[in-house]
Image: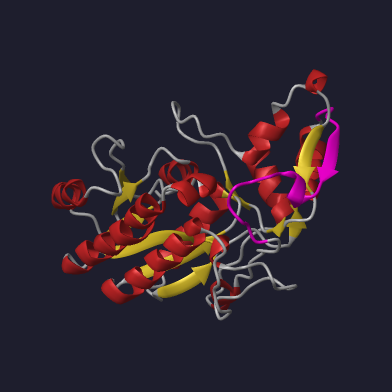
């Protein structure tokens, strides 16, 4: 693999890919020139770049806004992803698209594997699941990779801040920071995901994968560990998800198991090590 076309290059995962895949030529046009929802822009970008791999790291990922704009959610997270998979197949290009733990309903008590049946609770989760199905139907040399609670450093100018950044920039004089304690996930450092994707692409073992930092943890516990590792002086107060009053339903338990990655000999660090890598 020497040439990669990247959709969503200014986001947290896209930034990590551009930084870590330094043995590749990464072509990552700005959003004005390459937006996931624009079929013509993508076709033109593929013709110009002639990549071996097309990576989609973009999405309509505002979970609550998806509830208010379901048509847009499905247009971007499903229809556009399917079209990208089909374009990649036409050119014999490997296609990689990122999906989410929100395809599950949270009724499990152990981390979900790739063999567990999805059952999304929200428009966002349903639209991402539809994107998975379209990729598997329309794509050929395609990887669908579910991750969870992604965080990392975004490109300059991208106003989307990571969860840890929001925690560590909380003003102490504003009072205790309130973080949900009864939602369990597998928060994942974008740098670790980028490294795993690089190794996965080299296998040619196409299909559906989970790729997360290992371990199930509540967001409250995760925030406390981030504060501890950063040596910050912040008071964190645990709250229930019901006190958050989010518009979209979210799974209470959405930790993932990297079962199929493990079968390929690709290991992900623990969630604590992910925090360490991010802070470093």
Q: Is residue 66 left or right of residue 85?
A: right
- Horizontal and vertical percent for residue 94? 30, 65
Q: How many marks?
A: 0
Q: Which residue is drawn at 59% across and 38% down?
A: 162
Q: Where is the C terminus found, in terms of image quarters?
A: top right
Can residue 1 be seen in the rendering of this structure? no
- For residue 109, side relative to residue 191 (left or right): right
Residue bounds of the magenta highlight: 232-251
Residue 241 located within the stretch drawn in magenta: yes
Please name the residue shown 69% across and 26% down the image: 169
Is residue 101 a member of the stretch shown in magenta?
no
Residue 10, image quadrant:
top left
The residue nearer to you, when weighing 108 against 149, is 108
Q: Residue at x 23, y 66 (%)?
A: 86
Residue nearest the viewer, comparing 11 with 100: 100
Residue 232 location, x and y as percent? 80, 29
Q: How is the image coloured?
A: secondary structure
Residue 279 on image: x %, y %: 67, 37
Q: Nearer the viewer, residue 177 or 222?
A: 177
């Amino acid at each position: 693999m020497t040439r990669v076309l990247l959709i969503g290059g200014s986001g947290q995962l896209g930034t990590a890919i551009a930084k870590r895949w330094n043995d590749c030529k990464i072509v990552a046009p700005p959003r004005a020139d390459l937006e996931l929802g624009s079929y013509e822009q993508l076709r033109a970008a593929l013709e110009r770049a002639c990549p071996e791999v097309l990576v989609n790291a973009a999405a309509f990922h505002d979970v609550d806004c998806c509830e208010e704009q379901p048509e847009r959610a499905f247009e971007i997270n499903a229809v556009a992803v399917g079209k990208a998979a089909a374009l990649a197949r036409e050119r014999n290009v490997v296609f990689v698209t990122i999906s989410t733990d929100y395809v599950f309903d949270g009724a499990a008590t152990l981390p979900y594997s790739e063999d567990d049946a999805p059952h999304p609770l929200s428009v966002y989760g349903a639209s991402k699941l539809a994107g998975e199905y379209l990729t598997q139907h329309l794509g050929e040399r395609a990887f669908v990779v579910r991750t969870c609670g992604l965080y990392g450093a975004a490109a300059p100018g991208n106003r989307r801040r990571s969860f840890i950044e929001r925690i560590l920039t909380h003003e102490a004089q504003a009072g205790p920071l309130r973080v949900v304690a009864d939602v369990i996930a597998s928060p994942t450092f974008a740098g670790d995901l980028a490294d795993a994707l690089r190794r996965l692409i080299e296998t040619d073992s196409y299909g559906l994968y989970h790729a997360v930092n290992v371990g199930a943890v509540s967001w409250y516990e995760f925030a406390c560990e981030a504060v501890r590792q950063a040596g910050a002086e912040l008071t964190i107060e645990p709250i229930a998800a019901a006190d958050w009053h989010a518009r979209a339903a979210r799974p209470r338990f959405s930790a993932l198991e990297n079962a199929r990655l493990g079968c390929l000999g690709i290991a992900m660090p623990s969630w604590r090590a992910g925090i360490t890598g991010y802070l470093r």
